[in-house]
Image (cartoon, rainbow, N blue to C red):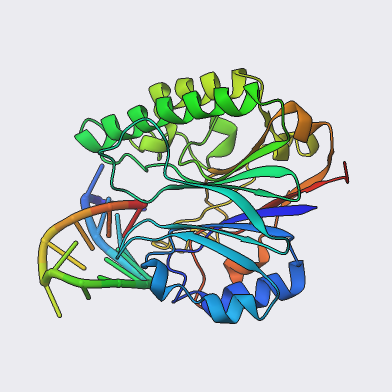
Amino acid sequence: MKIATWNVNSAKARLSNILAWVDEAKPEVLCLQEIKCLDADFPALELRSRGYHIETLGQRSYNGVALLARAPIGDVLRGLPGDDGDTQARYLEGTVAGVRVASIYLPNGNPVGTDKYDYKLAWMRRLTARARDLLDSERACVLAGDFNVAPTDDDVYDPLACAKDAVVQPSARAEFRVLLNLGLVDAYRVFHAEPHKYTYWDHYGRKFLSDEGLRIDHLLLTPQAADRLAAADIDRAPRGRDNPSDHTPIWCELADA
DNA sequence: ATGGTAGCCTTGCTA
């Protein structure tokens, strides 16, 4: 089962890019972030015609996550538990063919030193609590999405240039390690040790042309999923096409149970 | 050198 995640930076503006990629990559599950629309405005017809079941947690203008799957999506959880007052649409979880999959859009947190960064850290702690429950379930689970954390300096093009960015702050990296150290596996790093491989390149400044990016999109697997992990990679091609998102898809392959 | 682009609607805000 191929499971992919892609921050598309507007589902409507990116529809033709999304359709082109699902036609060629054929993921069984696709997690989308920053769909930037209400549930009713998500381009569901076009994706249903490609054979996908669809769940969305939409929001006007900002955020918004979706879960697409060839098989039916069961036991859907909308929103990250732990704060009933949180109105931002950043977390959607469901079960596809026995695998629990979460589509995650972790808060960016810029600028550092503001309530936005505090919100990021608090959200990360809630995610860690949720991950603890998923691990306790002893099921195959995949936490997929834009985590807005570059885990190490190997995951950024220039640590000095990025030093003030919320995605490299020591406290965010520490909380990311707390999450990983619960017992999750970074699927990409199982197969690729080389530094300076990215999933995101800033729109400003032609960063993709010079390959100045960040590795901030991840697939984190519970042991029961990691035991089935057969492959994982970043697909850079969509970032180089016309009208691209600033992120590109990353995917993993799980062998049949 | 502290800019620049993209997407949304709030023609400023978020990233």
Q: x%, y% of residue A212? A: 52, 51
Counting the numbered discs, the total is 0
| Quarter of the image where one finds residue A230 | top right
- Residue A172: horizontal and vertical position, in percent? 42, 27
Decide which of A130, A175 is in the foreground and name it: A130
Q: In this image, A54 relative to A13: left or right?
A: right
Q: Residue furthest front?
A: A75
Looking at the image, which residue is at 49% across and 77% down?
Answer: A43
Decide which of A239, A154 is in the foreground and name it.
Answer: A239
Q: Position of residue A177 (x, y in %)?
A: 54, 21
Corner quadrant of residue A141:
top right
The x, y position of residue A205, in whole percent, is: 41, 61
Q: Quadrant of the C terminus of chain A?
A: top right
Q: Please report the residue visible at 60 percent of the width from the left and 29 percent of the height from the top.
A: A134
Residue A114, relative to residue A44: is it above or below? Answer: above
Residue drawn at point x = 80 percent, y = 38 percent: A191
Q: Say left or right for A109 vs A90.
A: left
Q: Nearer the viewer, residue A42 or A12?
A: A42
Taking the spot 45% from the left edge, 72% from the top edge, the residue there is A42
Residue A210 against residue A99 in the figure, above or below: below
